[in-house]
Amino acid sequence: MAEKQAIVKPAGHALLAAVESAQLRKDVPVLRSGDTVRLQVKVVEGNKERLQPFEGIIIRLRGTSVNQNFTVLRTTNNVKVERTFLLHSPRIDKIEVLRHHKVRRNQLYYLRDLTGKAARLKELRPLSAKQIAAQEAQKAAKAATVASAKATAAAASNGDE
């Protein structure tokens, strides 16, 4: 009776991980909730295949690895359409992140009920070269004051001994 037991290979999880990693796309940008994206979706009509753009705000990200998916909310002429895509699907030809928005939650279901100006999100814009230089100068000044404070504290402790 003991000889009928199933033999479990120790490499089972490693084999599964290897097969899943082969299915992952390499050209996926970093996506977050609140990003405005434009997808090029492959649509099959009869025997022809064409690319159809779908643009909207990501309201949900879920899953991991091959099963990772996201939901995009698109508003056109006050009609809202939600569509869920697998991130690593061969049906998606291209993913472009157009804008990042400031959001404080991961799932933006409240956008379903909002219309007009109430449905807007605050856009996060990339820093200009001047702003980056100002930040670097501020960091350098802070580091210099910290170093001088440490030097005076070390000199004061050496004077006490």
Image (cartoon, rainbow, N blue to C red):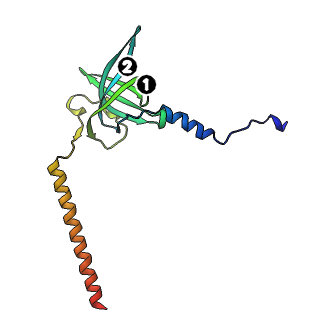
Residue 123: % across, % down: 22, 39
Task: Choose between 75 and 15: the one closer to the eye.
Answer: 15
Calculate the distance from the C-alpha at mark 1 to the C-alpha at mark 2: 8 Å
Q: Is residue 107 above or below residue 147?
A: above
Q: For residue 96, which quarter of the picture?
A: top left
Residue 118: % across, % down: 22, 33
Farthest top residue in view: 46
Q: Earlier in the sequence, mark 1 or mark 2?
A: 2
Farthest right residue in view: 1
Q: Which residue is mark 1?
A: 90
| Residue at 68 percent of width and 39 percent of height | 9
Q: Amino acid at mark 1?
A: Pro
| Residue at 58 percent of width and 36 percent of height | 16
Few, some or many C-alpha atoms within 10 Å of disc 1 (few <14, some 14-19, many ≥20)? few
| Residue at 16 percent of width and 48 percent of height | 129
Residue 156: % across, % down: 26, 85
Q: Which residue is mark 2?
A: 42
Q: How many marks?
A: 2
Task: Choose between 106 and 133: the one closer to the eye.
Answer: 133
Few, some or many C-alpha atoms within 10 Å of disc 2 (few <14, some 14-19, many ≥20)? some
**Tag 2 secondary structure:** strand
Q: Name the image quarter holding the C terminus.
A: bottom left
Q: Amino acid at mark 2?
A: Lys
**Tag 1 secondary structure:** loop
